[in-house]
Amino acid sequence: MRMGKAFILFCILVYSFSPAGLAASGKMNLNVKSAILMNADTGRILYAQNADRQIQPASLTKILSLYLINEAVGKGKVHPGDYVRISKKARKASGSRMFVEYGTSVQLEDLIKGMAVVSANDASIAAAEYIAGSEDKFVAQMNIKARELGMRHSCFKNSNGLPANGQTSTARDILKLSHEYIKRFPDALNIHAMQFYEYNHINQHNRNRFLKMYPEVDGLKTGFVCEAGYHIVVTAKKDHARLIAVVMGAATHRIRTRETKKLLDAGFRMLDNETRNTVVPSGAPLRDRNNRTSDR
């Protein structure tokens, strides 16, 4: 009888800390179109809400662009100190910019910082043209890489995320991309964590407000287009545990901030409670619960 009660308690705890348990229990109901949360150390999905809903990715697109740029640097095809000639197309980019001028030469490392910190659309086009010869060729490489990463519900039409017909992704796909990006290029977080970036005497702040308000946060990227709403990918590390949260489709940037904070707070509480309260019934075989995942 004692053994039976212990086993029942164990099952309740497992369910409570599983993604299905968290969602079904009503502990989390975010006011956004979609969201997903991962324990980056294990790959375990802690929470998902409409995670496969297709949405315009906006500037979250730049994470994939930065992935390809970092990959090209790692393979020695290009170097951070290379000078990139700015085209008319890059100069005319709308939206967020670092204000590069047509005909000037800008170091690739400056374009990378512009993309990561101030979400510069002009920098994205310039870097894409330099890496692949044209933005169209670069976008073709983006879609190949997306398929390699298992982003099955994503299609990209440009390098910066400006609105384009047929350009869509999902919270789950963006999570897969972000997780692999951080694993493969961990030093990139040093740039994503910069709160300000100055180019050509213009100082702009990082649009990721969590860098100021949430000490554990060290990245990653925000995005916004009118049709889709406000997005963010946030990664935070606490006590050797790293979370990655993707929130897409908030109605305002304040709602995005509030709901993302809820997700991070709940995620760290969940990991803390899981560490403290794991119950293994007497005589039951030990198992690594961190190997479980609902990401299928």
Image (cartoon, rainbow, N blue to C red):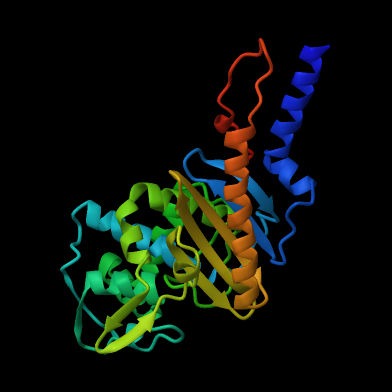
Along the viewing direction, whichever of 1 and 35 lies nearer the viewer: 1
Left or right: residue 89 compared with residue 211: left
Residue located at (22% from left, 51% from top): 75
Across the whole image, how many numbered discs are drawn on residues?
A: 0
Name the spot of residue 279 as percent of width and height, x first: 66, 25
Along the viewing direction, whichever of 277 and 226 lies nearer the viewer: 277
In the image, residue 239 sits, relative to residue 158, either above or below, namely above
Residue located at (58% from left, 74% from top): 165
Task: Indicate the quadrant containing the C terminus: top left, top right, bottom left or bottom right.
Answer: top right
Name the spot of residue 148 as percent of width and height, x first: 45, 47
Kindly indicate the quadrant of the structure image that contains residue 20. Answer: top right
In the image, residue 140 sits, relative to residue 16, either above or below, namely below
In the image, residue 296 sits, relative to residue 27, either above or below, namely above
Residue located at (79% from left, 46% from top): 25
Left or right: residue 249 compared with residue 189: right
In the image, residue 261 sits, relative to residue 113, either above or below, namely above
Residue located at (79% from left, 13% from top): 2
Left or right: residue 222 compared with residue 77: right
Name the spot of residue 232 as percent of width and height, x first: 54, 66
Q: Residue furthest right?
A: 1
Name the spot of residue 96 as percent of width and height, x first: 43, 83
Along the viewing direction, whichever of 265 and 90 lies nearer the viewer: 265
Tell me, yes or no, if residue 188 can be seen here.
yes
Kindly indicate the quadrant of the structure image that contains residue 139. Answer: bottom left
